[in-house]
Image: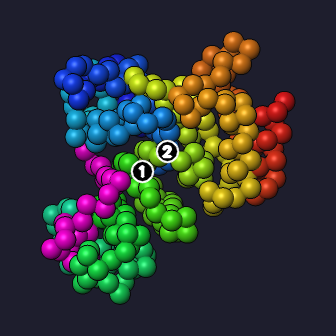
Amino acid sequence: MLEIRIDRKRYPDRGGRPHLALSGLRLDVARGEFVCVVGPSGCGKSTLLNIVGGLDRDMDGRVTMNGAFPEDVGFMFQEPRLMPWMSVLDNVLLVARAGDAARQRERAIALLRAMELGDVLDAYPTRLSGGMMRRVALARAFINEPALLLMDEPFVSLDSPTANRLREMLVEQWQRCGASVLFVTHDLREALALGDRVCFLSAAPGRVVLDLPVELARPRDAAAPAVDGLYQALLARHPELLGGLASAESGCDRKAAVASGAQAAGSGASGSDAGGQAQGRAAQ
């Protein structure tokens, strides 16, 4: 279990004044769970990932996974961050754990073939398209089969067919290795298509204002009627949610909001039926 408790996270703004980025943020991720984080620009989503990944430990609070700070972590950023002087295969092997080199090479090749990159193993990143570079970065994130995978808008700026194929590849590898995933995105449909849960952050200082279980059957597509139905129902219930505000209907607290979100998601049905259930239940 990943447990995140951030009481306060401050850093200097561009003028050098203290900026409170996160405050009172509580978030748990179960083993093997896929949790998406959505929130308005500047709410601290990337800061949250940097803290969990150990890139920034200057905060008041604690982050633990099974009782200790998470060490077995994979990271995929907004940009592929490939080394231009290294081949596709060597970029994946760059972060591989020390050990049996032949076995690691075999595993890297298998991952790249699963990413449909088997014919460019020896190519350099400058010869690849943007989508291909993201696939290399995705293979690299899974090379060590991490217990925790952190993803910071990894498919941003890609065209829809390319992003959809990458999401399919991500889910295939996640289901195969059983990692816990914390996935930051600004795209609510993407979050609903990928996540077991979607956590919505407030505007800065960021905190969780709604924790939504997504009970639609897999596989899912961001453009599927079920996902669109849940999207429409959710924003009808919480029209300012993407701005960082969850509606307090009839004085409900956060737990009640979570429950209403679960009802909106339906009971695990798939396809257009699930979308209809989500929309209908949100309207009640």
**Is the Cβ of the residue at disc 1 closer than 8 Å to that at disc 2?**
yes
Q: How is colour applied across the structure in the image? A: rainbow
**Helix or strand or loop: what does disc 1 sit on?**
loop
Which labelled disc corresponds to residue 117?
none
Q: Looking at the image, which residue is at 34% across and 25% down?
A: 21
Q: Is residue 205 above or below residue 152?
A: above
Magenta part of the chain = 71-94
The quadrant of the image that shows the N terminus is top left
Q: Nearer the viewer, residue 277 or 134?
A: 134
In which quarter of the view is residue 272 placed? bottom right
Q: Looking at the image, which residue is at 29% across and 22% down?
A: 19
Which labelled disc corresponds to residue 153?
1
The quadrant of the image that shows the C terminus is top right
Visible residue check, residue 174: yes
Q: Looking at the image, which residue is at 81% across and 44% down?
A: 277
Q: Give coordinates of residue 251: x percent, y percent.
A: 69, 12
Amino acid type assigned to the residue bearing label 1 in the image: Glu
Q: Give coordinates of residue 274: x percent, y percent.
A: 77, 50
Residue 82 covered by magenta stretch: yes
Q: Is residue 64 left or right of residue 225?
A: left
Q: Residues within 10 Å of mark 1 (few under 14, many from 20)?
A: some
Q: Nearer the viewer, residue 185 or 64?
A: 185
Which labelled disc corresponds to residue 186?
2
Amino acid type assigned to the residue bearing label 2 in the image: His
Residue 88 covered by magenta stretch: yes
Q: Is residue 89 above or below residue 277?
A: below
Q: Is residue 278 above or below residue 8?
A: below
Q: Give coordinates of residue 228: x percent, y percent.
A: 70, 50
Closer to the chain start, of discs 1 and 2, is 1
